[in-house]
Image (spheres, rainbow, N blue to C red):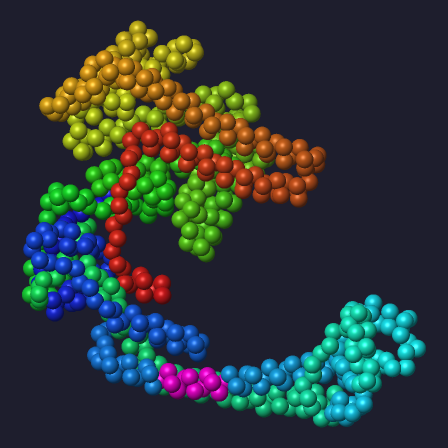
Amino acid sequence: MVEKMKLVHVQGTLPSLDDFLGACCLDGRFGLEPASQYMSASLGYAPLNEEDPYTPLVERIESLAAQIGAQLPELEPGRPQGLRQDRQFLDELAQKFAALRAERDSLQDQQRLCEDAIAQYSHFLSLKANVDEITGCDHVKVRFGFLPQAGYNKLMSSYADDPYILFVPCSQTPEGYWGIYLTPRSRSQETDGIFSMLYFEPLRVPGAAGSPAEIVEHFRENLEVVQKSLDDIDARVRELWENHEEKIGQLYAAARYQAAVFSLRHFAAVKGQHFFCVGWVPEREVDDIVKKARETADLRVTVDDPDKAGRYTPPTKLRNAWFVRPFEFFVEMYGLPNYDETDATPFVALTFTVLFGIMFGDVGQGIVLTLFSLFMWKVKKNALFHLLIPCGIASTCAGFVYGSFFGYEELLDPLYHALGMASKPVSVMDSITGILLFAVYIGVVLVLAAMGMNIYTQWRQGRLGSVLFGTNSVTGVITYLAGVDLVSAFMGAWVFMPVPLAAVLVGLGLASLLFAEVLAPLVNGEPDWRPAEGWGGYLMQNVFELLESVLSYLSNTISFLRVGAFVIVHASMMMVVFTLAGEPANLIVVVLGNGVVIALEALLSAIQGIRLEFYEMFSRFYTGGGRKFEAMNYGSEQAAG
């Protein structure tokens, strides 16, 4: 249902503005509107234009906590007592953390140097010579690096006899060799070119003294010292944070609260030291909001009905029972109802669930879909999975009617026999014609229900002419019912009124629909009921519109054949699964086939259900276009943060 709204005006002195906003506008019940739009510009009121001092403070505290990996505590909000002192405290604390962070960065550079050196020298542990001695030779150039297997093979085959090239392998991998090559400095350019063609990858090793094994051991010792220093820095950071954690938490909570209050100040209109606020409040919350506002000093509060808002329409806030609420997802997809329009959510909840269950009827698959949707909703909190839970239950119930359990058509027979039934209520593949006919009757009932919703909405809005005349009015219902009776009689099916009476009602109904745009304003007492384009133009235009209305009656009803078609498709897909599974049935094929059918049929049934809702039913009674009720809920934002 659409909640009834009240327009609340609040006036007071500027020092009381924050107190009012904090007391009444942070719990999601007071939807503030730009107050300057609800008053004449000649009164001299203007919106507040101020610099926010609190949000930067919040961001700075969050940045400080993120830099050191700390978790900000959640405390009760309060009011910052001294903003200048708070900033000075943060400056001093940030400087201390910055000094520790700089020291830590330096240690991490040393840590990376040690780790890189260990990784590089570990490839050359078999080399017993001192690195500083061989790299310090005056006449011999030495390069450390990696030679691929193909390059090594070519080196051995083409340059093995070259007296100026010496490659010493130190370790081997499946890809090649880690080692060093030596060459006279006078021939270094030529040798470098040869090894470049062999795809030798040179490696710059950090300078050090001793053999590679001694160097690795030395860097490991240094790494332990650096790690201890890093642990000491981390301990000092934690200690510094813990020593000030309570004050930081209090400051953070206060700054967030004040930032939330400050973000609402721009809704107020101000003149001198006086402010004016206006907003929408749900009718059931008005008394409590007014009481809180009046408890704040120097405030004057008035409450008006929506019709006093002039050209501004109230926002829409839906309020439905817990089992209907998930289906607000579909309604919002189409568009929120206008404030004075009927909420379609209960209608969608019932019709979509029933249609989905009929199309996806299987006991086992319905249970799987229910459990899967329940799990995903608990994990993801996604509205789509939430609304699939009742759909899965409906599918399970429909499965008992069809006697299908994961596609096994005879598995539930003992249950029916125990209940005194000769067989299951409906055998899908033996009742194709009946299922399709039943789907059409479902369409008739739901189209009539949609037209009934339109009549109810028009009655609530006081449009008697639209209640009586129009495609989806009382006249439309009578014409549609009489037309269904005529078609049923023509096809030899069940009829509910004499054919001559149905023919007369269709004729009268079509005539009424043809002149509906004249009769409706005439009933409403509107002076301009005559067609502006003249009777000739009116008749020419409305004959085609009448033809379109008749075709829409037919197409909307026939469209529900897809419900019966998907019942048959579902059973046919399971027959294919069991055909592929063979005899006796391969359990793996049956399980995989059921998984594919569940995913595919659930998707298709949902798509077809939405299509039927939007095109065949919503188009008859629902306009949408309402604007959403928006109010800050600091409590939920704090929990989310």
**Is residue 145 placed above or below 47 in the rendered structure?**
below
Toward which corner of the image does residue 479 lie, by quadrant? top left
Asked whether 428 falls inside the magenta stretch, the response is no
Residue 148 shows in the view = no
Main SS of residues in magenta: helix
Q: Position of residue 276 (x, y in %)?
A: 11, 59
Q: Is residue 100 magenta?
A: yes
Question: Is 633 rendered above or below residue 409?
Answer: below
Left or right for 55, reference 578: left
> Residue 134's quadrant in the figure?
bottom right
The residue stretch that appears in magenta:
93-104
Q: Quadrant of the C terminus?
A: bottom left
The answer to which of 537 and 343 lies nearer the viewer is: 537
Residue 39 location (% of width, % of height): 11, 52
Which residue is found at the position 79% from the left and 74% from the top? 193
Point 24% across, 40% down: residue:
338
Q: Is residue 28 visible?
A: yes
Q: Is residue 30 left or right of residue 361?
A: left
Of the pair 604 and 222, the residue shown nearer to us: 222
Q: Quadrant of residue 267?
A: bottom left
**In the displayed structure, would residue 510 be above or below residue 119?**
above
| Front residue of 68 and 138 | 138
Q: Residue at x 31, y 9 (%)?
A: 503
97 versus 32 height, above or below: below
Q: Position of residue 386 (x, y in %)?
A: 41, 48
Name the residue furthest front: 186
From the top left corner, tell me how far across and down residue 138 is, in percent: 78, 92
Instruction: Look at the image and tell me in which quarter the N terminus lies.
Output: top left
